[in-house]
């Protein structure tokens, strides 16, 4: 069964540049496979989920890899800071056995390898530029964003970040909003969010759903931005937010939301 055959897990929109699914798999289908791995993306596709959210960082040699933490110990058999490893060292790590024995031998995905898989599967990607302390946001954006744009069409890519400077660098790479959709991530929506979104020519605002108010949600929508909330794993508790105008939810297990979300606009 193909991802496009399932609803509401699959994307639906009237304009290619406005394509956005209701549900996005957080770090791949991280409820059933190790996060940010090729296995997690394959699992999402097999479950009929069209879009995934993944994190990208740079290794010591400048290689962009799909990884969330600044350190290695939580999701691999390695120790130390990711930024101190080169590609050869990083690829020797087992990034699957911590999750379950059947994933033993899973290797850290490079951005190139992940983009190739996403393209092969016809999926969409919310790529988060993840900045560890002391890392250069401009270098990350200049490395990862052109590679992602080359691999995927604009309608199947959103680049997001908690780092304003990283998104500013991304926008400098591609000034046209229709060719690069940017999403500004916040833990809690600040007072100056709209000014920043306007300056970035942002497509979307991404917030922690538990810290979002109805008034804030409606303000984001009234200002013309898409609203994406993370990390939603309780469909019943999240249900009122659809009425607030939330466009999409990022979830560890979007399957929980099957038949419990409104149709896409």
Image (spheres, rainbow, N blue to C red):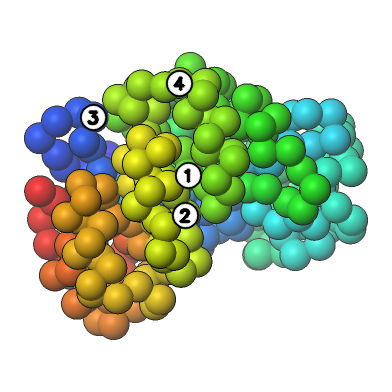
What percent of the width, then of the height, locates residue 254? 34, 62
- Circle 3 is placed at which residue position? 17
- Circle 2 is placed at which residue position? 185
Q: Are marks 2 and 3 in contact (CB under 8 Å)?
A: no
What percent of the width, then of the height, locates residue 14? 10, 35
Q: Answer with the quarter of the image where residue 240 lies.
A: bottom left
User: What's the CA distance linking mark 4 and mark 1?
Assistant: 14 Å
N-terminal of the two: label 2 or label 3? 3
Residue in the image at 20% along x and 28% along y: 16
Helix, strand or loop at disc 1? strand
Q: Nearer the viewer, residue 149 or 168?
A: 168
N-terminal of the two: label 2 or label 1? 1
Helix, strand or loop at disc 2? strand
Q: Are marks 2 and 1 in contact (CB under 8 Å)?
A: yes
Q: Which mark is residue 160?
A: 1
User: What's the CA distance linking mark 2 and mark 1?
Assistant: 6 Å
N-terminal of the two: label 3 or label 4? 3
Structural crowding at the residue carrying mark 4, measured as other residues with C-alpha within 10 Å and reported as few (<14), some (14–19) or many (≥20): some
| Residue 208 in sight in this render | yes
What percent of the width, then of the height, locates residue 155? 30, 29
User: What's the CA distance linking mark 3 and mark 4?
Assistant: 15 Å
Q: Nearer the viewer, residue 239 or 40?
A: 239
Structural crowding at the residue carrying mark 2, measured as other residues with C-alpha within 10 Å and reported as few (<14), some (14–19) or many (≥20): many
User: What's the CA distance linking mark 2 and mark 4?
Assistant: 19 Å
Residue in the image at 47% along x and 54% along y: 185
- Dividing the image into 4 quarters, which one contains the N terminus? top left
Helix, strand or loop at disc 3? helix
Q: Is residue 128 left or right of residue 125?
A: right
Q: Are marks 2 and 4 in contact (CB under 8 Å)?
A: no
Residue in the image at 21% along x and 51% along y: 223
């Amino acid at each position: 069964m193909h991802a496009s055959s399932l609803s509401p897990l699959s994307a639906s929109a009237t304009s290619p540049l406005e394509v956005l699914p209701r549900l996005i798999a957080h770090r791949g289908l991280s409820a059933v496979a190790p996060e940010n791995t090729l296995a997690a993306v394959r699992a999402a596709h097999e479950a009929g989920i069209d879009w995934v959210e993944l994190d990208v960082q740079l290794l010591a040699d400048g290689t962009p890899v799909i990884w969330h933490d600044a350190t290695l110990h939580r999701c691999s058999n390695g120790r130390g800071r990711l930024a101190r490893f080169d590609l050869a060292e990083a690829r020797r790590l087992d990034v699957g056995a911590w999750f379950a024995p059947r994933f033993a031998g899973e290797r850290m995905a490079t951005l190139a390898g992940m983009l190739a898989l996403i393209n092969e599967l016809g999926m969409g990607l919310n790529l988060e530029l993840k900045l560890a302390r002391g890392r250069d946001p401009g270098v990350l954006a200049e490395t990862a964003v052109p590679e992602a744009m080359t691999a995927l069409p604009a309608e199947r890519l959103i680049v997001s970040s908690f780092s304003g400077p990283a998104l500013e660098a991304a926008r400098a790479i591609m000034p046209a909003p229709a060719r690069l959709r940017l999403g500004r991530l916040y833990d809690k929506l600040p007072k100056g969010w709209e000014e920043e979104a306007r300056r970035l020519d942002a497509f979307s605002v991404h917030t922690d759903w538990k810290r979002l108010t109805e008034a804030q949600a409606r303000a984001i929508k009234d200002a013309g931005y898409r609203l994406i909330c993370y990390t939603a794993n309780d469909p019943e508790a999240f249900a009122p937010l659809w009425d607030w105008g939330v466009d999409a939810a990022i979830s560890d297990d979007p399957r929980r939301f099957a038949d419990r979300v409104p149709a896409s606009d």
